[in-house]
Amino acid sequence: MGVEEAARGFRGNKLALASIGFAEARGAGAFKNDGLLGVRLPKPKDVYLDWDVAVRLSPPDVGAAVRTLLRRREIAEFVSGAMAGAMTKAVLAPLETIRTRMVVGVGSKQIFGSFMEIMEHNGWQGLWAGNTINIIRIIPTQAIELGTFECVKRSMTSAQERWKEDGCPKIQLGGLTIELPLHLLSPIAIGGAAAGIVSTLVCHPLEVLKDRLTVNHEAYPSSIALAFNKIYRTEGVGGLYAGLCPTLVGMLPYSTCYYFMYETIKTSYCRAHKKSLSRPELLVIGALSGLTASTISFPLEVARKRLMVGALRGRCPPNMVAALAEVVKEEGLKGLFRGWAASSLKVMPTSGVTWVFYEACKDILLAPHLA
């Protein structure tokens, strides 16, 4: 606003300028008048009027800010993953406990036998042993995993569309130019692999804590903080990342196959029936995807668990190959799939329920944004 415009608004030593007001002043300082909060400025030497500057302030609408944030697709996917993971683990914790004990070779080799041992020694609470750390672990793990998968998948799809128009990236080797066939890569497979790797790197210490509390609850305090400190004092930072390499090796085929199976079956089914999936259909497709991925990568999961809890037995295989050889030597080839039935009973409902919760939460959070 110019000086002439300000002068036209002058009313009895006051100027009315929307939410900025000028009032007669007595000196420098703060003031409040008619709902205006402002500061009184001293009279400059070359100006014949003193003035106050005031700005009308209103409290921020926190609720609206949160709703706007959650309507962003990336945030909605991240939050939906966290909620889905937490709700699934809270319901299915007993299956996780039985599966972990059977995979690492603690107690009975039968599902019912393992269940009875837990009930005899620890009661009902034993079925939820380590579940607190499991919940703490799964919230960031699922949030990061599902958020990374969706983000990488979209980015790869967008990049491939550009490569179709502009050509794929090229590398120069002397006088030879090689075009990288990146357009042949599956965005779903790349997204699944990235999801597994990123979530594992970030959340692996929580996985170690969960396994230690589940397998040997007496050796580690019930407090998560005390168990964390004990591992750190006795084994250092390396103890919190015990079995990281085999975990990454096992996670890569599992995560890639898991997301590829789910997205492929889901997309094919929707196209064939020309409709979106119902909740029961999501449950079945998620369960089948989890079962397939788990079966393919299960021997690597057995080796990974052996390495992660090897310190409890006083003998830890030096690497994944040695762990696999040890299992075959002691139990034969069947040992590579020891606990597969319990794992399937855990993986199938977990995968199915997770996708149902995830898609439901995402639909709720993104519905206003997509409308």
Image (tube, grey):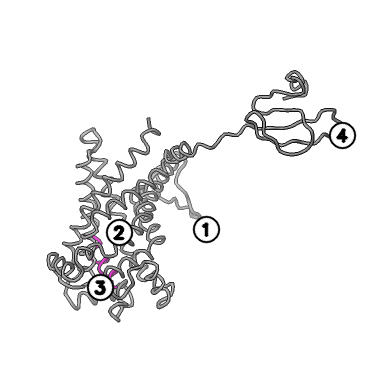
Percent x, y of residue 268? 24, 40
Say which mark, if any, is on residue 324.
3
The magenta stretch spans which residues? 295-306
Do residues under tags 1 and 2 come within 8 Å of each other at their CB atoms?
A: no
Q: Could you say which quadrant of the image residue 312 lies in?
A: bottom left
Q: Does the magenta run of residues contain 303? A: yes
**Structural distance between the alpha carbons of marks 2 and 3:** 17 Å
**Structural distance between the alpha carbons of marks 1 and 3:** 44 Å
Q: Which of the pair 122/65 is nearer the observer?
A: 122
Q: Which residue is mark 1?
A: 174
- Residue projecting furthest to the top: 8
Percent x, y of residue 370? 38, 33
Sequence-first tag of 2 and 3: 2
Quarter in which the C terminus is drawn:
top left
Percent x, y of residue 307? 31, 73
The vertical placement of 67 against 120, above or below, is: above
Q: Which residue is mark 2?
A: 253
Say which mark, if any, is on residue 45.
4
**Structural distance between the alpha carbons of marks 4 and 3:** 87 Å
Element under label 4? loop
Q: Is residue 302 left or right of residue 114?
A: right
Q: Residue at x 38, y 66 (%)?
A: 205
Q: Is residue 19 left or right of residue 360?
A: right
